[in-house]
Amino acid sequence: MCGDVRCHWATWFRAHYDHDKAKRDPTWLQNWGSDHTRLVDSRANELEEDGYTIYLEGQNRFSLTGSTGVMIAGCPDIVAVRDGAALVIDCKTGKSKTADEYQVLTYMLCLPHVAKPYSRLPLSGLLQYNYHSLEIASTRVDERLRSHFREVMQIAGGTEPPAKRPSGSECRFWDITALDCPERDDSYNAPPVRTDALF
């Protein structure tokens, strides 16, 4: 939804097929898991001390099936409730990306439709990184976002697959193997760092 994804085929494929997932480095996964848990616990403890009622990870899991038959599922790290309002929080241990904001916005959009308590509460969002946080205003869940969300769901639920647009910078984030996508591009290399007198 954020515009970072150019290969809509990957979204379509994952919506239509169960598939063998590309293997990830288990060391990376273990490190991510412990760092992520530490960040979630730290933020949750701070919020509880500030008087919030906290709902963590599995308590927030949801799934929602639309008219196209496509199911979207999510699991916000933290939902914090206080004074008749809810704060939807996702914790990230990596660098900030625009996609992070749209992940939280999707949670904010879907939660009122799947959990009755949130249908009556104003929802705002927060991205918590290791050294900073980013607030996401409730006003960003507007008709423009809803319309864009519907468009993406229609692409994912469509009967015809979109064109493939493989690129090394994008394929590395998908868990689709070359068996399912022979065009998969695993050639990603970070751009070189250069020094130039141009600026």
Image (cartoon, rainbow, N blue to C red):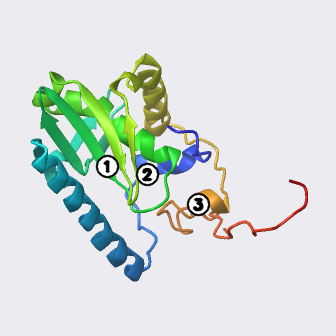
Tag 1 or tag 3, which sits nearer the N-term? 1
* Measured Cα–Cα span from mark 2 to mark 1: 23 Å
| In the displayed structure image, the side of residue 174 where residue 38 appears, left or right | left
Residue type, label 1: Asp
x and y percentages locating residue 105 in the rendered image: 37, 35
**Residue 127 seen in render:** yes
**Residue at image mark 3:** 171
Q: Which of 131/96 is in front?
A: 131
Tag 2 or tag 3, which sits nearer the N-term? 2
Q: Are marks 2 and 1 in contact (CB under 8 Å)?
A: no
* Measured Cα–Cα span from mark 3 to mark 1: 24 Å
- Residue 68, compared with residue 57, is above or below; it is above
* Element type at mark 2: helix
**Residue at image mark 2:** 14
Q: Residues within 10 Å of mark 1 (few under 14, many from 20)?
A: many
**Residue at image mark 1:** 90
Residue at the location (62% across, 45% down)?
6
Q: Nearer the viewer, mark 2 or mark 1?
A: 1
* Measured Cα–Cα span from mark 3 to mark 2: 13 Å
